[in-house]
Image (spheres, coloured by chain):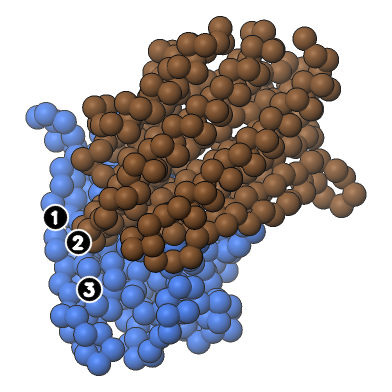
Chain colours: A brown, B blue
Amino acid sequence: MPGKESQKRLAHEWFCKLQDQICTALERLEADADPSIYSDRPGKFQKTAWQRGTGNIDEGGGTAALLKGRVFEKAGVHVSRVWGSFSDEFRGQIPGTEDDPHFWAAGISLIIHPKNPHVPAVHMNTRFICTAQSWFGGGVDLTPVLDVDRHQGSFDTIAFHQALKTACDAHASGDYEKYRAWCDRYFYLPHRDEPRGTGGIFYDRLQNNWNDDLAFTKAVGKAFLEVYPQIVTRRMKEKWTPAEREEQLIRRGRYVEFNLLYDRGTTFGLKTGGNVATILSSMPPVVKWP
Amino acid sequence: MPGKESQKRLAHEWFCKLQDQICTALERLEADADPSIYSDRPGKFQKTAWQRGTGNIDEGGGTAALLKGRVFEKAGVHVSRVWGSFSDEFRGQIPGTEDDPHFWAAGISLIIHPKNPHVPAVHMNTRFICTAQSWFGGGVDLTPVLDVDRHQGSFDTIAFHQALKTACDAHASGDYEKYRAWCDRYFYLPHRDEPRGTGGIFYDRLQNNWNDDLAFTKAVGKAFLEVYPQIVTRRMKEKWTPAEREEQLIRRGRYVEFNLLYDRGTTFGLKTGGNVATILSSMPPVVKWP
């Protein structure tokens, strides 16, 4: 097992590599889109580096990659590597900070809001966190925005779950049924008694064998990188109606409600001095609450 | 001083009367709008009654009045009168529930999102709450959506504050400077280091002389009823550009962020079985996070 500093380096290198691969894959889909359906020019990712810490204090930072395109109305693929000390308010909420408030965290976080209502939105986040303990966490979940696609029997959802099951089954750290149920519990809007999407996987506090934990985290990223572009390729050819666009914009409101009311990453990030622009780049580009 | 049951009746009657007066005033503005600027037909309020409680248990309810118009893209003016018991989770957060979880609450709540970016959005809420204690609370605040109007020197903001100051100064319960500062503190987005709007007043736990507390609460409602239509009448005649509309839609995103991340009424209502459709009718009709 690599030492702690090597673990941090290896994890961060993977997140950066995955960011590059995902950006390349999404730009290829932008370029390949049928201009009779997508008349704008293909979008490209804009990368913005940001730093954490005030004054001369270096507390890391990250690279935000944002695409505003014709297929992907808004896609954010962000990598960060930050460190510092938790305030008293947040100590005790985070394992391993009872005696020492220092932390180090790196991760990749992605949200994609396609323009075409037939193409599901998607979210992925994987991370490696070090306090006095260290662990991996993360998840991937799919959000079809039309009611007609929002069920377990839809082709996209079946393909998505199958890819994640394959990734889980290949690794000792990957407990598919447990992580799938965890995802269903987490991405849920109690005030509306509605799931956010059609599921995926969610896991946290993964601290088994470090090498296998990293390998599993890589497998989750690779599974996303394979299955989501396949779904987009298939569905982006379908034309949509104004009524379907309206349904999409209203469904996106649920996404906003979830992220601002319940999502730990969003609320935690905003309250601990995270990068506001990056955190809120998860917000959909246009939303309706009619 | 009226007995407790009379207090409840008198407070609720006022909220209902104010709802009617506000709906009438807003419908008149809809009717009077210049059709060369507002080409749609004038909007009318739709009223929907809702009940709280499950099965045969009567826990009150309310009347939601919603207008989707040409001047007011979305306006909700709601009255509710509810009672029940707080769950253990919320006892202790509410004064007077330490020994008895029962509560009774009535109030009026209003949010207006005009179509014209030159016309400020506005929020008002006043309420009378009874536990083992009883008190009035509420507030009114203005949210100009264009940067050019978002300062204390703007004509609308000066007129708005002046009307509230006059209402406060006429009543022993009305401490204008205190309530204005309270509003500035409350309607603030720490993650963006931005105020939500240009202020107003906010007060809570008002339990001085009941008759004066009610009179002050009425004065706040009447001040709103007088000054906001004046602001709308003046600004609704101004035409707007697509760039101003874009600025408005982005500014509305801050309104969503505030309500879902911080607003106690919204988060408390959603977590205590409030009427979801009514609570979230505060969401703007169209929003952008580009």
Task: Kindly identify which numbered label has been placed on residue B69.
Answer: 3
SS at mark 1 in the image: strand
| Residue identified by numbered label 2 | B65
Position of residue A106 relative to residue B105, above or below, is above
Task: Determine whether, in the image, residue B255 is placed left or right of residue B61.
Answer: right
Residue holding disc 1: B48
Image spot of residue B143 (x, y percent): 46, 70
- For mark 1, name the chain: B
Give coordinates of residue B69: x percent, y percent.
22, 73
Q: Quadrant of the N terminus of chain B?
A: bottom left
Dot 2 amino acid type = Ala
Which numbered disc, 1 or 2, marks the residue that appears first in the sequence? Answer: 1
Kind of residue sitting beneath label 1:
Thr
Chain of the residue displaying label 2: B
**For marks 3 and 1 on the same chain, the one whose residue lies earlier in the sequence:** 1
At which x and y percent is residue A74?
48, 54
Of the two numbered discs 3 and 1 in the rendering, the one whose residue sits closer to the viewer:
3
